[in-house]
Image (cartoon, helix red, strand yellow):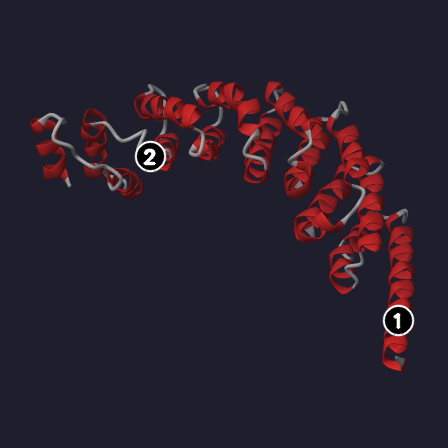
Amino acid sequence: MAAVSIRSVDAGHSSDWAFKRLFKLESECRSSTLAAQVQAVGQFPKLFDQFPFPTLVGSAFLKLGDLFCNSSNSLRYHIAQVFAASQHHLPHTAYIEELLRRVLVVLYSNDPIARVLALRLIGNASVVFAKFPEAQHGVLLRYQSTHPLEVAAAVHTTESLLTYSPEFLNVVWETVIAKASDTSVLDSVRAQLIRSLRHAAPNLQLSTLLYSHCSFWVDQPGSTIAVKEAALATWKAVIQPHNELKPIDAERISYFVLHDLGCMRRAALALLGTWKPTGSGPAVGVGLVKERL
């Protein structure tokens, strides 16, 4: 009984010390110098790991949310990094909606760089934010931006949200398909968008539609190597019993086995590895594919 009492006292002291440390860090975050603010913000992950009390962690994240709303973009960057480093603590907090509301204030601001940082933070905290329609809608709206960094950040965040909320794909499907097919969009953005669509694999209707889109992107005029490689990888992800690789497509893909670039050869071989020739396929086409392999 005495041992239990000692442990309770120790836990109480630890909790008191942890909150004192939190208040000290909060004060340092209000410093007049950016260097001191950055140093203080950088101490939060260590605090979370040392004292993972839900009440403390929840309060600390809310304080970071307040600071995110009212700080410079330089400090916002470091706050977003804290969310990335400490995302495993987020599911244990009880103030997620309040925290999201603070981040959305920045996402709907007039500063495109601030919006980029808000998107990054939402992506870093997608383990808890992904289920909220407000977060999903906010990310979807950013695809309409004319700022390339903002669109790229929206793509990155979409990928993160889909990891924890595959249903989000139904919301963002048409927008992602349109952007992925737009040759004026940066190659890296198009490639990431196409790869994010692998989350359609469990969906019978979307995976069937995606088969056709992947086929189009591989041969689309203006598609670069990065886009073609992403299309082949995503195409492989959606190959299923109801969505098998057609012999005519297998023949087209087999040309890439002879490509000069190793990345294209590997992507083509990986996709063809899912192919199961059937007796109903054209004998000539099957023979050509086997010859190239």
Q: Secondary structure at mark 2?
A: loop
Q: Amino acid at mark 1?
A: Ser
Q: Amino acid at mark 2?
A: Gln
Q: Residue at x 65, y 28 (%)?
A: 136
Residue 260 falls left or right of residue 29: left
Say whether residue 219 is left or right of residue 84: left
52 versus 71 height, above or below: below
Quick one: quadrant of the C terminus?
top left
Instruction: Give coordinates of residue 131: x percent, y percent.
Output: 66, 34
Placement of the N terminus among the 4 image quadrants: bottom right
The quadrant holding residue 99 is top right
Residue 265 relative to residue 52: left or right: left
Q: Identify the secondary structure beneath mark 1.
A: helix
Closer-to-camera residue (287/141):
287
Estimate the x, y position of residue 130 in percent, counting from the top left: 64, 36
What number is the disc on residue 8? 1
Q: CA distance from mark 1 to mark 2?
A: 56 Å
Name the residue nearer the viewer: 88 or 84: 88
The answer to which of marks 1 and 2 sits earlier in the sequence is 1
**Considering depth in this image, is 166 or 87 the residue closer to the camera?**
166
Residue position marked by numbered label 2 in the rendering: 240
x 23%, y 34%: residue: 256
Q: Nearer the viewer, residue 100 or 95?
A: 95
Q: Position of residue 240 (x, y in %)?
A: 33, 34
